[in-house]
Image (cartoon, rainbow, N blue to C red):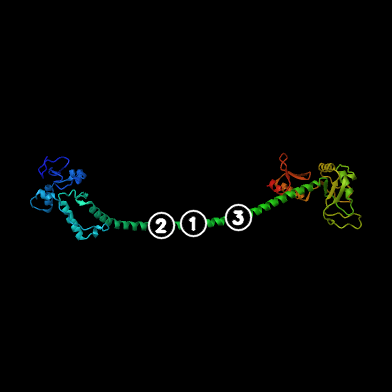
Amino acid sequence: MDCLACDTKVFDTEVVQCVLCKGCYHHNCVGITTACYQKNLSELRKSWRCPPCTESVSRRRRNDNTPVRNHHAELAPPAPPAQAPVDANMSCEEIPHDQDSSSATAFTAQMDRPDAAQIQGTKLVGNMPLEQFTLLLDARLRGFLTPMMEELKTSLSDEINSTLVSIKAEFSKELECIKNKIVALEKENTNLHQELALIKVHSGDNDLKATIKQLRVELNDREQISLLNDVEITNVPECDGESVGHIVLAVATKLGLQLDERDVVSAHRVGPRRPPAAAPSAAADIAPIASRPRPIVLRLARRSVRDQLVNNARVRRGTTTADIGLPPHAPKTIYVNERLTKENRSIFAKARENARSKNWRFVWTKEGRVYVRKEHKEKAHWLRTEEDVQQVFC
């Protein structure tokens, strides 16, 4: 193929073809250096236009009817018009009007140049140098993004401040609630310590009371053991100048037990002396008799003798004081029982009282112990304390 500019043969290594008219030229004939040609070969093959086609497009844009100029005159590239420098920090709105005008003129001139695709190896964006395009783009983006960033910054600042205020208020509320709970816990802890101290005191008192109670029970048991050889004879008339030893022997004989003086350790009446029932007659030689005779306490030398005397009294229940050598009096029933301690006598009395009110049939003593039973074949209960009486008859 031949070059349309110099009418000589053109080889593939130096040809440039117009994308519009498909005409072929040496790249040197259209003002493109070898280095620029080799560097931008692919771009030239895609978008390069020959001078006639470029001039035709430019005329249409300018509404120019001037005939097409000589091809060879267009091959020499004209000097680029001087352009005012663009401040990289200027927004698009801040670019002076004369600079905009000159830039527009320069842009138009660049568009009309036949070597618009490449000028001395300078990269182009469209028909504008890359550096100029970058400056204009940076300025416009800066002018567009700056107010947006300021607005976003203000919005975020307000949102953050509002959130912080809300969090602070909520935190203060929760902190106050925690403080109130801590105060309540401290108060409850103080109350618990006080209650614990009282419990310890009461526990100590309870332990002490339990110990005292146990000691009293043990002491009562020991005292009762010391009375195992004693019997108590009640309802025997009392008069002045009586011989208690003679009365005891007479009562034992009437109950069917022959006592020797060696079997009797001691015999005497206990309790305060009571006044006589009536003044003695002057004519009669009769000793005055007390209105309510004191009981006679008899201590025997052997326990077996005591047990036999008590058993005989139970067998001969209803024996009276007649014919035992006492002054004239109305005969009375003689009662012979085991001698009990003061504590056991109180327990025995309360047991009899509760048995009568609760319809319990049996209340008795054995070996100094108080027993109760509701019916004949039911379990017998040993009463050691007054609390036992309350528990059994509850």
User: For the residue carrying disc 3, how many other residues have a C-alpha within 10 Å: few (<14), some (14-19), or many (20+)?
Assistant: few
Mark toward the viewer: 3 or 2 = 2
* Mark 2 surroundings within 10 Å by alpha-carbon count, few (fewer than 14), some (14 through 19), many (20 or more): few
- The reply to whether discs 3 and 2 touch (Cβ–Cβ < 8 Å) is no
Q: Which residue is mark 2?
A: 164
Q: Position of residue 353 (x, y in %)?
A: 73, 49
Of 15 and 277, the residue lying toward us: 15
Q: Could you tell which of marks 1 and 2 lies nearer the N-terminus?
A: 2
Question: CA separation, marks 3 and 2?
Answer: 42 Å
Which numbered disc covers residue 177?
A: 1
If you read the primary sequence from the N terminus, does the residue marked by circle 3 or circle 1 appear first? Answer: 1
> Residue 186, image x and y in percent?
55, 56
The picture places residue 89, in percent across and down from the top left corner, at: 27, 58
Which class describes the residues within 10 Å of circle 1: few (<14), some (14-19), or many (20+)? few
Residue 36 makes an appearance in the image? yes
Q: Position of residue 369 (x, y in %)?
A: 76, 45
N-terminal of the pair, mark 3 or mark 2, is 2
In terms of image quadrants, where is residue 164?
A: bottom left
Mark seen at residue 152: none
Q: Residue at x 9, y 49 (%)?
A: 70
Q: Amino acid at mark 3?
A: His
Circle 1 — which element?
Answer: helix
The kind of residue tagged 1 is Cys
Of marks 1 and 2, the one in the foreground: 2
The quadrant of the rendering that contains the N terminus is top left
> Residue 294 vs residue 204: left or right?
right
Numbered label attached to residue 193: 3
Calculate the distance from the C-alpha at mark 3 to the C-alpha at mark 1.
24 Å
Identified by mark 2, the residue type is Leu
